[in-house]
Amino acid sequence: MDPVTVVGLAASIVQLINATTKAIKYLNDVKEAPKDRARLAREATSLLALLIDLRYRVEEAESTDPWFAGVCSLGVEGGPLEQFKKAIEELAEKLKPEGGMRKFGKALLWTLDKNEIGNTLSRIERLKTLVGFALQKDHLADDHLEKIHRWLSAPDPSLNYNEARKKRQAISGAWFIGSKRFAEWKTQPDSFLWLHGIPGCGKTVLSCTIVEDILHYCNHDPTLAVAYFYFDFNDAEKQQHEKMIRSLITQLSIQSASTPRSLESLFSSKMNGMQQPVAGELLATLRQMVQEFDQTFIILDALDECKERQELLMDINEIARWKNRKLHMLATSRREKEIEEWLEPLINDREKICIQSALVNDDIRAYVHERLQTDWRLRRWQNKPEVQQEIQRTLMDKVDGM
């Protein structure tokens, strides 16, 4: 649907909202009105709430949303919205005071007969039904996607992300985020980076910084998407390669304008969720979903914490073989022989980055300084800067990127 159509439809709804609001005001102001007045006012107020909801949904809608075509049919020339606008304007005209200006202290008079009331109520009810049905389609689409998400049963990686953020200092990872290699990874087609280091060197905190940067980079651009996953020794679900794929699919589906066709097809092929897909089917679906965005960024943390190591590395190998120019993938792990051997054919030396280096020491120095200032157990040294400096110097001499 072109933007002009969307703007025109939204403008028609706004006009109808204004006309209905005016009619409700007149209905509330009349004196000595029959009981039908109250019913008419209630029905018009109920319709007004639906119209306001419809207005904002139209303004936020995508042309591919399954419910949008139905809403547009309401706004065609001579359609339900136009017909009701004419009727509500006629109602307001009959109720408004003479000369269009209400004199101070003078109430409006009821001028409608039962036939006119009945006709107006019928039109209100019809439009409420049509608008309600259109909005219900939108809700049904949301409910359907939620059902698919329950079927996928993917673990939530944001829990790990948020936990890592708590440990991150303001400048953590700045050495990498500001590097040329990271900038190239974000912009070069079909890019892959592997960040490796010994335990305790800050891989997970760095991946958190990367995810945060990419989330900001993709923000407000629906053509870009980001998905991430944290493998975790402390969470059995986050040690399974298939759970990673399910999570990536779930995250991308949330960022899609509507339920991706490939995901819908997979769901329906499994008797609408009565059966489970195998890893190969999930990977094929992920591949098609990546194609729906101009650029997709995937960040995987701690590959070494996946119990199904070989299956995971086969997944990564398969994804890399797609040679998808729209895809950018980054992974972190310890530098273990099995991982390195699997990744060797996929990346060159420049795409392997050791994060146990002097650059990481800047992050550690910031952390140590912050702890010396805020940890209650170290408060006794706050007035002794020479002692704090000695503590920091001693620790930094021994860290070696750890």
Image (cartoon, rainbow, N blue to C red):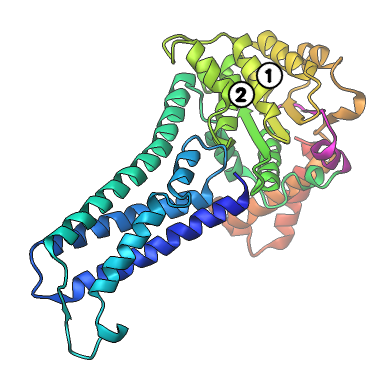
* Rendered residue at 45%/19% (across/down): 151
Q: In the displayed structure, would residue 71 be above or below residue 95? A: above
Separation (CA) of disc 1 from disc 2: 8 Å
Q: Which mark is residue 231?
A: 2
* Mark 2: amino acid: Phe
Q: Is residue 247 left or right of residue 100?
A: right
Q: Work out which quarter of the rendered image holds the N terminus and state it.
A: top right
In front: 9, or 99? 99
- Residue 21 lies in the magenta stretch: no
Magenta highlight range: 180-200
Task: Say what secondary structure mark 1 lies in.
Answer: helix
Q: Which mark is residue 304?
A: 1
Indicate the position of residue 52 as horizontal and vertical percent values: 39, 56
Q: Is residue 301 left or right of residue 317?
A: left
Q: Which image quadrant is residue 253 in?
A: top right
Q: In the displayed structure, would residue 91 be above or below residue 240? A: below
Number of numbered callouts drawn: 2
Graded by Cα atoms within 10 Å as few (under 14), some (14 to 19) or many (20 or more), the crowding at tag 1 reads many
